[in-house]
Amino acid sequence: MTADYRLQALEDPTAVIRELYRAHSSDNFPRFVAEHFQKLFESPNAFKRIPTLDVRRPPRTHKDRALVRFRAMVQDTSLSTEMYLSQFSDGSCGGWGMYETEGSSRSSEVDYTNLRECSTLWATSVPGESEWSAQELDGFMHDPSSTSQLVLTTERAYKYPHPDSDHVGVQVKLYDRDGLESFKSTEVVTFVGILSSEPCNLDQTSASPADTPTLHVLFSQPHVPTVLERSFPRIERLPHREGHIASADSRGPSRAAQDNAQVRDELISWIADEALCGDRVAAEWVLLVCIARVQSRHPPLHPPTLTISRFPPPPPIPSTLPSASLPLPALSAVLQLLLPLAHTLPLSLDTLNKSQFVPESKDEDLHAGVLQLPQGTVLLVTEGGVREGQLLERGVFNVRALQDVMDAQTLSYVFPYSQFSFPTDITCIVLSEGRKSTFFRTDLNVPLKAPTTPAAIASLYKPAEEVTLPSADKLAAFRDLVVGARSGKVQVPEDTSEYIQTGFVRERQNDRALAADDLIRQMTIAKLYALSLHEPSLSVDIWRRAKELDDQRKASVA
């Protein structure tokens, strides 16, 4: 019987709501609807039968009032609350985009006791979402040719952090008001609802507002901070099958993996060989920083920021176009292959002086900023495109905004007469040509040790399709290690704590310049080292190895 209800919900969700209302009308009917549809699609297989709304299947490819699921980043929560009739004059159900047609009402008077509120927000495709992560969550193998025929035009592209990229933007209406306060800007949520087209809430002053894709939400599903769920410590997987999408469901019985050290070593070698000209030291630091996240805001325990210095700029590209885009470093493609959320920000004076890095409200409409990214994103900032010139007022403001993200993990939202800072969780890696970053202070500086021959520099900027992939099983193990480590926690046993304190006191006697911040940095690095080995406990041996790695780093930039 459940299968029949599910099929009916997939084919005509509007009819299901009407039937539910006739049988179960109640004061909190939206909550009843949410629970009913959640129950129908609670199993992962049933949930993946719901058609997706995304750049491969944009709004115009779905029929009117189709049931869809939209994995999205909440971009703007400031849209006005709307009123709707929960029951029409004939006793039928209202809401979820159902309206009383002209002439159907037997009375021109509105029963105000049937008025209810629905909240409205704007949501977009998830910025920086990697292709493999989308495939795993959506349950399909992507055929690149499937989107080559589509010309994607998006309403209000300025509400997406990277408006020149393909994306979907949708007006989202929420009828179940329980827990609405939990939706925060940059949060990743999967909304399941009925897709229609309606005038946008943002066009209230317009005489003839244009219709906008609108999702009337039936229920929603939050995502874990890492977007994808992975075990910590890592567990063994079943062998990969051709054509099968590797996912958390591909893991075998819950048996802890015994090869974490080997997988970690192979991962470091792969990052080094494919993106850093074989520099394993720089690759190891990239790994450690990639698994870092905000551990605490009070006191602040933020992910360390990393500069890979002495990173050559991209080779010149013969072009008659004055604004030809420079190639991205191969590290960008490697991070996209390993992480659910990764974005590359190529800096130039033109980008800094003209782009909008922070969200800004204009005419009561929040325009997105380049840095309005989901929590858990790894941001790769490249300075190879920066040339001599003047940094204007907007450029200075943008540099300060990114520095605030690095230092305080906050991003300013600008309003006409004020600005407010909101929490972020963005890990930053900077690639700089000089001895240090041109614009930013970072916690860690690791000089790249690589040849400077034209062939070596070209390999640093090889296109994504030239990155050599490991086997499917090996790549899945790499992802399990990285994503699992991002969700892990490390305990410090008492004997290790005593060893660390005794050693720090001894070192400080010999070097009075050592401060508490140095110990905090060393502890952070040691915990990341343990996480990268999927060790839930910080042993004395891991502490020594992590400290030696940091000591070598400091010596290399002395």
Image (spheres, helix red, strand yellow):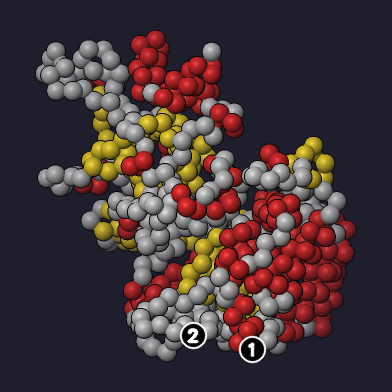
Residue placed at 54% from the left, 17% from the top? 2
* Image height of 522 relative to 89, above or below: below
* Image height of 148 relative to 397, above or below: above
User: Tag 2, which secondary structure?
Assistant: loop
Answer few, some or many: residues within 10 Å of disc 2's Cα (few below 14, many 20 plus, some between 14 and 19). few
The residue that label 2 is drawn on is 316
Toward the top, the furthest residue is 23
Residue placed at 51% from the left, 36% from the top? 221
Q: Amino acid at mark 1?
A: Thr
Asked whether the residues under the numbered discs 2 and 1 touch, taking CB atoms below 8 Å apart as contact, a structural biologist would say no
Q: Position of residue 502 (x, y in %)?
A: 85, 69
Q: Would residue 81 be seen by someone viewing this image from the given angle?
A: no
The residue that label 1 is drawn on is 453
Judging depth in this view, the residue of 271 and 32 nearest the camera is 271
User: Tag 1, which secondary structure?
Assistant: loop
Q: CA distance from mark 2 to mark 1?
A: 14 Å
Q: Is 282 positioned to the left or the right of 175 in the image? A: right
Q: Would residue 102 be seen by someone viewing this image from the given angle?
A: yes
Residue placed at 72% from the left, 81% from the top? 554
Q: Is 501 positioned to the left or the right of 83 in the image? A: right
Q: In which quarter of the view is residue 471 placed?
A: bottom right
* Image height of 415 relative to 33, above or below: below
Q: Quadrant of the C terminus?
A: bottom right
Q: Position of residue 381 (x, y in %)?
A: 52, 72
Q: Amino acid at mark 2?
A: Pro
Question: Which mark sits nearer the N-terminus, 2 or 1?
Answer: 2
Answer few, some or many: residues within 10 Å of disc 1's Cα (few below 14, many 20 plus, some between 14 and 19). few
Q: Quadrant of the N terminus?
A: top right
Q: Is 402 positioned to the left or the right of 60 in the image? A: right
Q: In which quarter of the view is residue 545 placed?
A: bottom right
